[in-house]
Image (tube, rainbow, N blue to C red):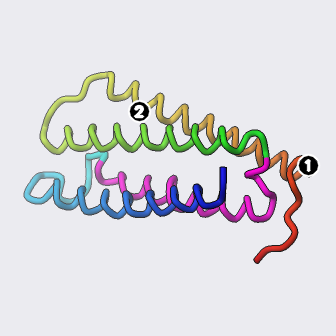
Amino acid sequence: MSQRAVFIAASVYLVLGLAGGVYFREMTKGTPFESGEGTQLAVLHTHLLTLGFLAMLVVLVLDKVYRLAHSRFFAWFFWVYNAGLVLTVAIMTVHGTMQVLGVPASAAISGIAGLGHITLGAGLVLLLFAINDGLRGRTAPATTID
């Protein structure tokens, strides 16, 4: 896993986060959800920007300092975390759209959202393992911060 992959992920989440804000605004025009209350779409773009864009930028900095990419846990973190985030925001989009359209949601929506959050949590634990490897010197040492 390279810094380039993390940068690309951050860039994709930035675009998706901005698009999520536009989707929310356009989807709720002329509906009772115009104020942003009561729909998952209201927080879709903040989830993408915070858990996607900003989190990946923090990981880039941590990798630069601690060489996280050299940890045996880093690739696992990257794929598990991103899978969890994609699942979480996908179900938020579906659920929020259903709310705006007045379609009742089943318990499956909550279950899938829960799986996304559990996967995100597992990814964060893997990140902690990768950071621990960096702190203990189990990765290639950082020479300089360019």
Q: Position of residue 54 (x, y in %)?
A: 55, 62
The furthest residue to the top: 107
Question: Which residue appears at 46% of the width and 30% of the height?
Answer: 114
Q: x and y percent of residue 134 in the render?
A: 84, 52
At label 1, counting other C-alpha atoms closer than 10 Å, the crowd grade (few under 14, some 14-19, many 20 or more) is: few
Task: Tell me where residue 76 sits by quadrant.
Answer: top right
Earlier along the polypeptide chain: callout 2 or callout 1? 2
From the top left corner, tell me how far across and down residue 81 is, in percent.
57, 42
Please, what secondary structure does the residue beneath circle 1 have?
loop
Q: For this view, does 97 lie left or right of residue 76?
A: left
Does residue 121 appear to the left or right of 73 in the view shown? left
The numbered mark at residue 55 is: none
| Depth order, front residue of 4/31 | 4
Tell me if residue 61 comes above or below residue 55 in the rendering.
Answer: below
Per the rendering, the mark at residue 136 is 1
Residue 113 is marked as 2
- Residue 64 is covered by the magenta coloring: yes
Residue furthest out toward the right: 137
Circle 2: residue type: Ala
Q: Are marks 2 and 1 in contact (CB under 8 Å)?
A: no
Where is 56 relative to 126, above or below? below
Front residue of this view, candidates 61 and 121? 61
User: Of tags 2 and 1, which is closer to the observer?
Assistant: 1
Count how many numbered circles sit on residues in the image. 2
Gap in angstroms between the C-alphas marked 2 and 1: 35 Å
Residues in magenta? Answer: 41-70
